[in-house]
Amino acid sequence: MAEGVKPRVKAPKSASAGEVVTIKTLISHPMESGQRKDSDGNKIPRSIINRFTAEFNGTSVIDVTMEPAISTNPYFEFDAKVPESGEFKFTWYDDDGSVYEDSKPVTVG
């Protein structure tokens, strides 16, 4: 597990039924490519976030596969339609098997 990994999400707390909202996500992660060596000459193991998903009430909104060339601290901004009150669930998958999650409720009113 990479150290200091912290997911952050900015989503509205409320919306109108059918409104399209903007979601912003960022995960603090060193994104080690596996190409560098440490001070002793040993390869530093690859550790990248290789997939990001977002769901609303269990329905997929976005599913992104990332490759080693992705930058440190990947940021995503996307739009999603909010048909009803519910919860956005965000999941980041790490090469080492770690899974980082966050969620944000949205109330339609």
Image (spheres, rainbow, N blue to C red):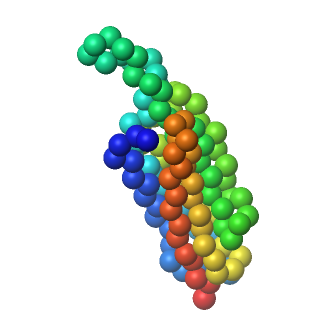
Quarter of the image where one finds residue 45: top left
Residue at 57 percent of width and 38 percent of height: 50
Residue 71: x, y in percent? Answer: 45, 34
Which quadrant of the figure contains the N terminus? Answer: top left
The spot of residue 49 in percent (x, y) is 52, 40
Q: Residue at x 52, y 58 (%)?
A: 101
The image shows residue 63, relative to residue 31, as above or below, that is below
Q: Quick one: which residue is furthest to the top in this view?
A: 41
67 over 14 or under it: above or below: above
From the top left corner, tell me how far across and down residue 99 is, in percent: 53, 50
x and y, in percent, of residue 4 in the image:
34, 46
Give the residue at x 48% y 27%: 46
Extreme residue in the left direction: 39
- Judge by depth and name the residue closer to the eye, 1 or 13: 1
Establish if 38 lies above or below 68. Answer: above
Q: Is residue 42 left or right of residue 95?
A: left
Question: Viewed as shown, does residue 107 lie left or right of 2?
Answer: right
Q: Residue furthest bottom?
A: 109
Labels in figure, total? 0
Name the quadrant containing residue 80: bottom right
Residue 16 at least partly seen: no
Residue visible at 60% across and 67% down in the picture? 88
Quadrant in the picture for the C terminus:
bottom right
Is residue 13 visible to the viewer in this orientation of the structure?
A: yes
- Foreground: 84 or 50? 50
